[in-house]
Image (cartoon, helix red, strand yellow):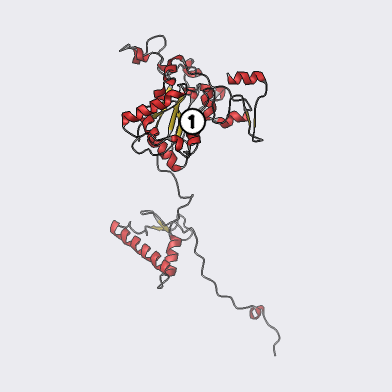
């Protein structure tokens, strides 16, 4: 018996190969009209031939999409033998991902980089010397020593001091009802500029001569909330719509510093400064805020019920009795003419880190902040 065996006899038979796994990112098919190189190595020595199929007609493309939807439906039902084919088709279809998502052509415009100082080329896009290069140009509409174009004809007094006029952002009753329905504004608590700015209802910029909001009557027929709101200006119909539902409205003035603190209380509290007193209105607004018909915060409190009843008779609605309402305590909440926040008196310091309120005890400070 021959005991010599070769290595060829000792090797195991080869195992059957498994089919190649399908790639999650299939090869991109050649576009129509692209020349496919057929040959060894794909170099210039191979022969060239256009073997790509012509583009599908709209009818043919619709048939292909119908077959794809039918294959996906068969795969979802799990019946028949089209399940593997449908899965294979799904693997071959393109996926929506961050790789193939891009903005529409022309949607993004590349910003031109401007230099700064001596490292910006020649003039950094600012031109030659002067106000335009140094950035000290005057306000919009100024024409340098002559009457501006928009003031030449006609010359009437209502254009005088236009750059110093107080601006009031309009807030409609429809927008207020919208904020209440979304839950951004809580109608069970007094509403002022702090709640309105936190709810993104208005944007107040004191540096641009903004002095608050003006409540207008748009949406008075659909307004149904019962609120205690404080604004800076309000129309007569807006006041009637608030009081018809059993609500209360007050108009109050805020100087620019108090207005900025009221709109952005958190940055002010983080500075650790005492809450200042609210300044009184200027001379031209004293008559407005002392009139009970405007629900001014400086009006005589005994004249407010008479003005409410007179307005109800004018517009023909029954004035609700808020003294019997379950929210009477909230509806009767008012601010002192020197007070900025509800529940926080002037002179108090809010400690945000320890969640405490520090109150002054010195008699001079108490006399100053209460005067």
Position of residue 23 measured from the top left corner of the image (x, y, whole percent): 50, 61
Quarter of the rendering occupied by the C terminus: top right
176 vs 256: above or below: below
Residue furthest to the left in view is: 59
Quarter of the rendering occupied by the N terminus: bottom right
Mark 1, secondary structure of its residue: helix
Q: Is residue 8 left or right of residue 254?
A: right
Position of residue 281 measured from the top left corner of the image (x, y, whole percent): 48, 18
What is the crowding at mark 1: few (fewer than 14 residues within 10 Å), some, or many (at least 20)?
many
Position of residue 298 measured from the top left corner of the image (x, y, whole percent): 47, 21
Residue at 46 percent of width and 61 percent of height: 91
Residue at the spot of label 1: 193
Nearer the observer, 306 or 276: 306
Nearer the observer, 182 or 167: 182
191 vs 63: above or below: above
46 vs 143: above or below: below
Give the mark count.
1
Q: Can you tell which quarter of the image residue 85 is in?
A: bottom left
Q: Is residue 12 left or right of residue 158?
A: right
Residue at 41 percent of width and 27 percent of height: 305
146 vs 183: above or below: above
């Amino acid at each position: 018996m021959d005991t010599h065996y070769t290595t060829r006899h000792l090797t195991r038979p080869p195992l059957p190969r498994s089919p190649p796994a399908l790639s999650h990112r299939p090869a991109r098919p050649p576009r129509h009209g692209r020349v496919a190189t057929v040959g060894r190595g794909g170099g210039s020595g191979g022969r060239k031939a256009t073997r790509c199929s012509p583009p599908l007609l709209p009818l043919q493309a619709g048939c292909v999409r119908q077959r794809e939807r039918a294959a996906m439906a068969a795969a979802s039902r799990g019946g028949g033998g089209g399940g593997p084919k449908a899965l294979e088709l799904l693997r071959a279809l393109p996926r929506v991902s961050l790789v193939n998502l891009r903005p529409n052509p022309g949607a993004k415009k590349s910003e031109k980089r401007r230099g700064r100082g001596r490292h910006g080329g020649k003039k950094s896009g600012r031109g030659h010397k002067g106000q335009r290069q140094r950035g000290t140009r005057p306000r919009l509409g100024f024409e340098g020593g002559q009457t501006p174009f928009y003031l030449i004809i006609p010359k009437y007094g209502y254009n005088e001091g236009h750059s110093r006029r107080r601006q009031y952002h309009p807030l409609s009753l429809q927008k207020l009802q919208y904020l209440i329905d979304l839950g951004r504004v809580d109608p069970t608590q007094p509403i002022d500029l702090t709640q309105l700015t936190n709810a993104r209802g208005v944007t107040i910029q004191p540096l641009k001569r903004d002095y608050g909001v003006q409540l207008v009557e748009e949406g008075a027929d659909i307004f149904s909330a019962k609120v205690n709101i404080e604004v800076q200006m309000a129309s007569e119909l807006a006041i009637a719509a608030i009081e018809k539902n059993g609500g209360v409205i007050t108009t109050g003035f805020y100087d620019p510093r108090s207005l900025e603190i009221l709109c952005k209380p958190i940055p002010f509290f983080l500075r650790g400064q005492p809450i200042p007193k609210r300044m009184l209105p200027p001379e031209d607004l004293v008559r407005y805020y002392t009139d009970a018909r405007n629900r001014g915060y400086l009006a005589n409190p005994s004249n407010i019920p008479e003005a409410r009843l007179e307005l109800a008779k004018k517009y023909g609605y029954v004035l609700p009795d808020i003294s019997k309402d379950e929210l009477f305590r909230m509806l009767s909440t008012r601010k002192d003419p020197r007070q900025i926040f509800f529940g926080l008196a002037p002179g108090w310091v809010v400690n945000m880190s320890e969640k405490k309120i520090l109150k002054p005890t010195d008699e001079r400070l108490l006399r100053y902040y209460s005067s």
